[in-house]
Image (spheres, coloured by chain):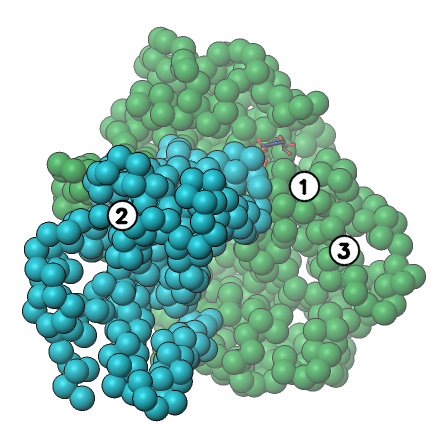
Chain colours: A cyan, B green
Amino acid sequence: MSAVFSLTMVAETLRISAPYACAAAGGVWAERSGVIQIGLEGVLLTSAFTSVAVAHATGSAALGVVAGVIAGAAISVGHGLLVEKARVDAVVSGIALNLSAMAGTRLALRGLYGSASNSPAIEGFRFGPTGSAGWSLLARVFADPVTLLAIAAVVATPFVLARTRLGLRVRAAGENPVAAAAVGVDVTRVRLSALAISGAVCALGGVHLAFDQHRFESGMSNGRGFIALAAVVVSGWRAGRAAMACLAFGALEALQIVLQDQARKGSLGDLVQLLPYVATLLVLAFAAGRSAAPKGLGKPAEE
Amino acid sequence: MPAPVLRVDRATRRFGELVAVDGASLTLEAGAVSAIVGENGAGKSTLLKLCAGVLAPSSGRVLIGDADLAPATMAEASRRGVGLVHQHFMLVGAFRAIENVVLGAEPVRSGGRLDLATATARVRELMTASGLPVPLDAITDDLTVGERQRLEILRVLYRGARVLLLDEPTAVLSPLEAEELYGTLRRLAAEGRAVAVVTHRLDEVVRFADRVTVMRRGRVVHEAELRLEGGGRRPAAGLEEELTRAIMGGDPPPPFAPPAFAEGAAVALAVAGLRLGDGAGRTLLDGVDLEVRAGEIVGVAGVEGNGQRELVRALAGLEPRAEGTVTVAGQRLDPRARDAVRARRSVLAVVHEDRHEDGLMLEASVADNLVIGDLGDPRSIAFDEAAVVARRLGRFHVDPADPARLAGELSGGNQQKLVVARALDRLLSARATGAAVLAQPTRGVDVGAAAAIHAAIGEAAAAGLGVLVVSADLAELRRLAHRLVVMRRGRIVATLPPTASEAEIGRAMLGVEAA
Ligand SMILES: Nc1ncnc2c1ncn2[C@@H]1O[C@H](COP(=O)(O)OP(=O)(O)OP(=O)(O)O)[C@@H](O)[C@H]1O
Ligand SMILES: [Mg+2]
């Protein structure tokens, strides 16, 4: 049982939560600005692939990270342009984003690396201790630049939204775009900025996923974008709570890994794997209807 | 004579075919409160929007000081000291009041961090100087309408406005609050600002304005100085009638007389023991008992926020948690019953106070808005939508009477006519027995349209409906009703004849014992 309350557990929780938390923070940025964003999954996938491809091509992990983040921000802004300028339905655009990310990365895998399943391995960031348990694992997690960036972005999100001029305008655009426009806020511009940030923050999650595996695997986001979206809704579109929800989800998944190790021989393993998902369903069932979406979510910028 | 601070010179503004403002000129001077009046759709709001750079004129000029407003944008107008308070609140409900004040003109420290402390200090100074108290840390949705109105003005002052434009600021205020507001505006003008107020309440113009401009179909058709040389005011006698004539371009409508009503008529609407809490321990309705007889018009008076809104919502079946009974035309309405909606619809017409929130689909056509609620009924197979729409448009003089236009494009007063038309016409045409409940039926509505709505209310009563009217406008209630009831803290605390004096009604509203 002590395995459950161990440093390994803490380290694994952080490592596993990072992509969820980044995607959720990205979701909060988009939706608090009033743009429905169900394309987080696609952003994760695209940024994961881009970071690996660039890191592989240049041999520079740092360049990979930068490229991944730019790619995430770019397609997120693309979604924003479609919705705000071309008045495409946000759900349709989001679905399109997810599908084309799925198909596009698969196509690029084949084209670039001649593989249907995964890219060649990349070096990523390898320094600090190398253990896979206890102190050394925790130290490794905290020495990883991508994890640090992810933590910084997730922690900064609620602060920036609550305390800065940009945050105030983003919230105004999401709550009441007409009123915001009436006091001279350029709602479309604010929303596009929010989407750029949303894409960049979410992309850190994608990059984290890929760098954690040291390669890109087809479909490796594996529904994380949708679970993050659920976390956003359950938390009532509040960044801090969404991050906590993701941390809790990560902890359950970590627990499942730890327990699975111990229950490997029994048939319990499969059931244990269900744990995080069952927990999500339960939370959704109890929190549904109690959260308040931004009032202007999905409302166009003009009267 | 003081120099003009803002001048509109033969400005025209078109929306496609429609000419909303047609070669209108206007001069606003420092130190003066100017009133702008006119029918719904006359172009008053559009004119103010031209002044504030919200809209650019199609032709003509707007001058601030000596120079053209160029570019004609809100940012430029605001920078040069012109501030507009819109006809509808432009506030973010979920924000704290102070956040609404600074939005768009935020003081920041390094890194774009909001400096709300500095803002709060400045706004507090403004509040004391201008006499506009608002709880700055409260959530805007929790503020009273009066507080929200003050918040809007504070926000304009915070941006350093020298020209203050207010579009129907008193439409949502009680008479007392309106009087306070004009006191504030006079003070702000005396400090050297120019103030312009759009209103439909002519008594306000007569009492508080220095001059008045009358608009009709986009043009300025009449102007009058109300402050006489040497400091006096023009006597009120005849002034209201002169303005009414100018506004309507003809004779004023005959004064409203409530139709005769027989004391012994059957009870049309009976409310017994109606209670409602807000779920957080606060009592909103505290046992309301009320009877309205067929053909009777009962007016509900009260300081806003004393349960009137909830009463109307409960009657409309929108408060499923309400306890107590509502009986209309002998039929008990239970919101939880199957078929509750249809049962209610066939005997009860409701007009909600917030036409944007509860009354209209702004993005849908006038036609759709006029028949929503009549569709989906088995009988509606024989329902001639076009005919019904035409009848409702005609009966209430909606202008433009174009069924295809979006409801959101109509002027405020015409939007109100849509809501009233839909509610009353349904029962009147079906010759149904029942009741009509109208909250603030003429809020933001011009004299002519108000007369039309009052006439329709009279018609409804004459046809045998029981009518309950909730209004913040005491004068309106006294004119309309056979009987007044006063609401305070969620209960009915007094029943008075409409001949009771405003002072007497006011005392009941505030809960002060008569001396
Ligand atoms: N954005 C718009 N698009 C199209 N037509 C408009 C628009 N804004 C106003 N109009 C039309 O211009 C005319 C003038 O409208 P405006 O809102 O200025 O009237 P108003 O005098 O303020 O009326 P009210 O007293 O009802 O507020 C109306 O016929 C209205 O339908
Ligand atoms: Mg108007």
Mark 1 surroundings within 10 Å by alpha-carbon count, few (fewer than 14), some (14 through 19), many (20 or more): some
- Whether residue B160 is situated above or below residue A119 in the rendered picture: above
- Secondary structure, mark 2, is loop
Image depth: mark 3 or mark 2 in front = 2
Residue holding disc 2: A122
Q: Residue A15: in sight, yes or no?
A: yes
Of all chains, the one bearing label 3 is B
Amino acid type shown at disc 1: Leu
Residue holding disc 1: B406
Asked whether A69 or B342 is in front, the reply is: A69
Image depth: mark 2 or mark 1 in front = 2
Identified at 55% across, 55% down, the residue is B357
Amino acid type shown at disc 2: Ile
Identified at 41% across, 43% down, the residue is A113
Q: Position of residue B157 (x, y in %)?
A: 28, 34
Mark 2 surroundings within 10 Å by alpha-carbon count, few (fewer than 14), some (14 through 19), many (20 or more): many
Farthest bottom residue in view: A266
Asked whether B128 or B112 is in front, the reply is: B112
Amino acid type shown at disc 3: Val
Q: Position of residue B65 (x, y in %)?
A: 34, 13
- Marks 2 and 1 sit apart, C-alpha to C-alpha, by 58 Å
Residue holding disc 3: B371
Q: For ligand 1, which image quadrant applies?
A: top right
Identify the image quadrant of residue A266.
Answer: bottom left
Q: Position of residue B508 (x, y in %)?
A: 43, 69
Q: Position of residue B74 (x, y in %)?
A: 40, 26
Identified at 56% across, 69% down, the residue is B313
Asked whether B319 or A43 is in front, the reply is: A43
